[in-house]
Image (cartoon, grey):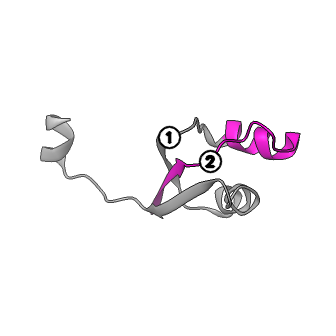
């Protein structure tokens, strides 16, 4: 399943509660990166917070890369 790498680049401190809750549901904290599956539910959450985050496709790690990390 394809995955998305999501990074919060702006603060949600002064944002409405719905937006802050979406950031929490995505597991985001300022300047941290998370990997989430690319599905309609995640896309909907990202649409609400698109002005606070950067999104890019996640690169799949091979077995060798996973062991090194």
Viewer-nearest residue: 50 or 22: 50
Q: Quadrant of residue 14?
A: top right
Question: Does residue 14 appear in this view?
Answer: yes
| Mark drawn on residue 58 | none
Compared to residue 69, the image places residue 3 above or below, namely below
Q: Quadrant of residue 47?
A: bottom right
Figure quadrant of the C terminus: top left
Q: Is residue 20 part of the magenta span, yes or no?
A: yes
Residue at x 69%, y 42% (from the top left corner): 23
Residue at x 32%, y 59% (from the top left corner): 59
How packed is label 2: few (under 14 Cα within 10 Å), some, or many (20 or more)? some
Q: Residue 43: horizontal and vertical position, in percent? A: 66, 62
| Residues in magenta, as a range | 2-25
Compared to residue 65, the image places residue 37 above or below, namely below
**Disc 1 designates what residue?**
31
SS under mark 2 = loop
The Cα–Cα distance between marks 2 and 1, rounded to whole angstroms, is: 8 Å
């Amino acid at each position: 399943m394809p995955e998305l790498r999501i990074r919060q680049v702006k603060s949600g401190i002064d944002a409405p509660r719905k937006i802050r809750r979406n950031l929490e549901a995505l597991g985001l904290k300022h300047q941290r990166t998370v990997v989430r599956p690319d599905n309609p539910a995640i896309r909907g959450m990202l649409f609400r917070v698109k002005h606070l985050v950067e999104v890019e496709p996640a690169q799949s790690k091979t077995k060798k890369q996973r062991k090194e990390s």
